[in-house]
Amino acid sequence: MTQTLKDLAIGFFIVILVFGLLFALGRLENAYTREAEVLYIQNGEVTVKDFSDNLWSFTTSNSNEYYKTQLVTLHMNMCGTTNIYDDIIEWVDIS
């Protein structure tokens, strides 16, 4: 009986580990970065333009970190599609 419980626990752990790895790999496959320039900041919303002339915006609790013409790196998520217009900004690094 004890060996059966150990085997079940090990099997459960392996299943959780496999699903976790698949989830992590899926997130990596959908991730990319994009360089952009800050256009303006208003009420905690920062609007940027990437070098393909796409506009993006994100909210921040500390808008004092950003200023006009500042370069930032957008960490993007493709959301599993090839359509750029549904992509999401996951986080932003200040260049």
Image: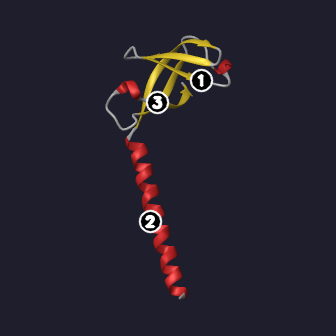
Q: Is residue 29 above or below residue 75?
A: below
SS class, disc 3: strand
Q: Residue furthest front?
A: 1
- Tag of residue 88: 3
Residue depicted at x 55% and y 29%: 93
Query: The disc labelled 2 sits on which kind of residue?
Result: Val
Q: Residues within 10 Å of mark 3 (few under 14, many from 20)?
A: some
Instruction: Give the residue type that dot 3 points to.
Output: Ile
Q: Residue at x 42, y 61 (%)?
A: 18
The tag on residue 59 is 1
Residue located at (49% from left, 77% from top)? 8
Q: Looking at the image, tell me whether mark 2 or mark 1 is earlier in sequence order.
A: 2
| Amino acid type at image mark 1 | Thr
> Which residue occupies the extreme left position in the image?
82
Q: Which picture quadrant has residue 91?
A: top right
Q: Who is closer to the viewer here, 50 or 78?
A: 78
Q: Mark 1 and mark 2 in contact (Cβ < 8 Å)? A: no
* Mark 1 neighbour density, 10 Å: few (under 14) some (14–19) many (20 or more): few
Label 2 crowding class (10 Å Cα cut-off): few <14, some 14-19, many 20+?
few
Nearer-N-terminus badge (3/2): 2
Residue 72 percent coordinates (x, y): 52, 23
Colour mode of the rendering: secondary structure
Where residue 87 sits in the image (x, y, percent)?
42, 29
CA distance separating discs 2 and 1 = 37 Å
Residue 15, label in figure: 2
